[in-house]
Every structure is written in C-alpha cells, then in structure tokens.
Image: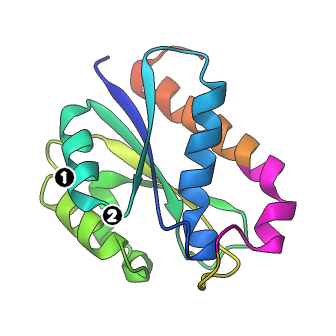
Amino acid sequence: MGKIIVLGIGNRLMMDDGIGIYLVEHLAQLNRTSDVSFLIGESDIDYCMDQIMKASVVIIVDAVFSNSQPGELTVYPLAQLHEYHALDISAHNFHLFQALYQYTESIKGYLIGVEPFEIGFHIGLSETLSEKWKTILQDVSQSIDKLLEMESGISR
C-alpha cells in the first residue's frame, strides 16, 4: 500500500467544528506505525487537496451533521460523498468535498464524520463532546484501524 494519510479538518474557532483537528492531533501522538501520516488541514482547501492527491488512501475526520447523537460516528466512502446532501452544512466542506467529487475516480478513502453538539464562535469543544472525548477518540481510532485493514487486508 502507498502513502496513507489521516486528515483532520474543521475550524477550532467554531466549537465542535474543530473535532476532526483535535482527534487527529491526539491520534498523531499515539501513532504506532510509520506507514500512516496524521495531518491537520483545518479549512485550507489547497493544502488538503495537495496532500490528498499525493496519497493512495485518505481518511478525513470532520464534524458532520447526520442526525445522529452528538459524538456518534458515520463513515462515508469518499466516492459516494456527492450522495449526501447533509454534508453541505458547513463553512468549509462545500469547497473540499466538491473538489473531491471531481476526483472520485482517482481518490480512494473515507470520511469519518463525528456528530457535533454545537457549532458557534468559541475555541474548544462543547461540554457535551468534551464529556464524550475518550469514547469518541477510541471509536475514531478503531474505525481508522478497520478501514485500513479493509484497504490493506492486514490486521493492525
């Protein structure tokens, strides 16, 4: 398998919209393998697309409204993102996800969406997601391992 990246996107200044950044920063510190790069893209679409185009597999972690309970995960194959209208609800995902749609044939990967509780002007997560931090971190870590296992056929 070639270059694998886990990319955290969002905005730290918008409460739970920054959950992807916080999770990937923490997972980078725990990274047990050298074959996975954990990167922070925030809302820099050009940087994100540059990194994504260099990867053989990309896993994006972001806050996504999916009508789930706060902190729950939803995994979307990137090739099918255009089918989910709910992904249009964000200040940054319109551009990145629309850009990804142009490359659905060449980009292989997934979006791990974490249901936010609140998005508003504030640095840091809402109290609701902060209380669920350990569970969310564990769920995202396990989801990444399962997705990479599916892609490589190798148990992590």
The mark nearer the N terminus, 2 or 1, is: 2
Q: Amino acid at mark 2?
A: Leu
Q: Is residue 69 above or below residue 113?
A: below
Image x and y of residue 76, in percent:
44, 56
On the image, numbered disc 2 is attached to which residue? 81
Q: Is residue 29 left or right of residue 82?
A: right
Q: Residue at x 47, y 14 (%)?
A: 34
User: How many marks overall?
Assistant: 2
Image disc number at residue 104? 1
Q: Which residues are magenta?
A: 123-136
Relative to 46, residue 98 above or below: below
- Looking at the rendered image, the quarter that the N terminus falls into is top left
Q: Whole-Å distance between the Cαs marked 2 and 1?
A: 9 Å
- Crowding around mark 1 (Cα neighbors within 10 Å: few <14, some 14 to 19, many 20+) is some
Task: Determine the residue positioned at 68% across, 67% down.
Answer: 124
Residue 112 screen position, x and y as percent:
52, 53
Q: Is residue 135 left or right of residue 7?
A: right
Q: Residue 22 at what x, y percent from top left?
A: 61, 52
Tell me the quarter of the picture where residue 90 sits.
bottom left
Magenta stretch mostly in which secondary structure? helix
Q: Which secondary structure lies at badge 1?
A: loop
